[in-house]
């Protein structure tokens, strides 16, 4: 599915023409394209952490009013948030 969508995008052909030439159901191909876009959008939710962003200064305010300001490793900060 992904390979065919990618091939179509690079071909410069219309969807209908690509489907005719590859004996594909047009409605199904439309669905594949939609799914392909959704999957690529899901991947945008991930953020790559570079080595330089591993350490940071963060202030955590808990619901009970306790404030905690730390300069620490992001892994340590994520553990504090889960408390």
Image: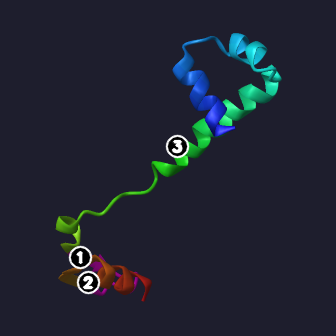
Q: Quadrant of residue 19?
A: top right
- Above or below for 12 versus 53: above
Q: Mark on residue 41?
A: 3
Q: Residue at x 78, y 13 (%)?
A: 20
Q: Position of residue 42 (x, y in %)?
A: 54, 49
Q: CA distance from mark 3 to mark 2?
A: 35 Å
SS state under label 1: strand
Q: Is residue 36 rendered to the left or right of residue 77?
A: right
User: Which residue is denoted by mark 2 in the rendering?
Assistant: 67
Q: Is residue 45 rendered to the left or right of residue 24?
A: left
What span is in magenta? 57-67
Q: Quadrant of the N terminus?
A: top right
Circle 2/circle 1 CB separation < 8 Å: yes
User: Which residue is denoted by mark 1 in the rendering?
Assistant: 59
SS state under label 2: strand
Q: Position of residue 7 (x, y in %)?
A: 59, 27
Answer whether residue 81 is magenta in the image.
no
Q: Is residue 15 rendered to the left or right of residue 24?
A: left
Answer whether residue 59 is magenta in the image.
yes
Q: CA distance from mark 1 to mark 3?
A: 31 Å
């Amino acid at each position: 599915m992904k390979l065919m969508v990618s091939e179509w995008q690079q071909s410069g052909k219309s969807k209908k023409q690509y489907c005719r030439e590859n004996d594909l159901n047009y409605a199904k191909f439309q669905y594949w394209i939609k799914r392909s876009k959704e999957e690529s959008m899901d991947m945008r939710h991930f953020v790559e952490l570079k080595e330089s962003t591993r350490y940071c200064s963060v202030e955590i305010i808990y619901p009970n009013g306790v404030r905690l300001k730390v300069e620490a490793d992001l892994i340590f900060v994520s553990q504090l948030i889960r408390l």
